[in-house]
Image (cartoon, helix red, strand yellow):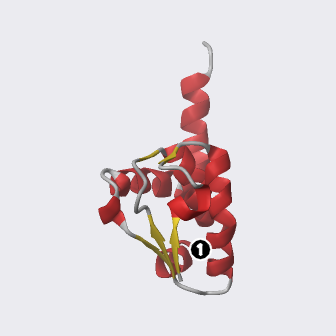
Amino acid sequence: MKIVVLDIVNKSIVAFHEEGLLVFPILDNAIKNKETVEVSFDGIEQCTTQFLHSAIGKLYLNYPIDTVDKFLVIDYDTLPNLKTKMDKVRWSALNAEKYGQIISEATSIS
């Protein structure tokens, strides 16, 4: 199966959590059914990590790492810096407890 983000969100700039939540159920269903799903960012001009966290990062919280990596294929060639952003999103999801502590410490008032 192949999904095109632009076809789902109908915007060339995907920046918000809510937009990612439009993509997540499709990916979640594919992973749940052990179907390979390719995600294309063709036609997307800009993408934020906030979008990626809600669309893809949640998969790493819900499934074993090797399962997500096996069934999720991302077309990195269609959007500059997508690989770097996804590496950050994946790390954050896989280190959710540690990441949460870092954010908490960074935003606490001393």
Identified at 59% across, 23% down, the residue is 107
- Residue 88: x and y in percent read 43, 50
Front residue of 8 and 22: 8
Vertically, is 42 above or below 110?
A: below
Front residue of 80 and 42: 42
User: Left or right: where does residue 31 sit relative to residue 1?
Assistant: right
User: Left or right: where does residue 17 sit relative to residue 49?
Assistant: right
Identified at 33% across, 61% down, the residue is 78
Front residue of 109 and 34: 34
Identified at 60% across, 62% down, the residue is 8
Vertically, is 105 above or below 24?
A: above
Report the quarter where the C terminus lies: top right
Judged from this view, the residue extending furthest toward the top is: 110
Vertically, is 99 above or below 73?
A: above
- Residue 80: x and y in percent read 30, 52
Q: Secondary structure at mark 1?
A: loop
Judged from this view, the residue extending furthest toward the bottom is: 34
Mark 1 residue type: Pro
- Residue 51: x and y in percent read 56, 49
User: Left or right: where does residue 57 sit relative to residue 25?
Assistant: left
What residue is shown with label 1?
Answer: 64
- Residue 40: x and y in percent read 44, 67
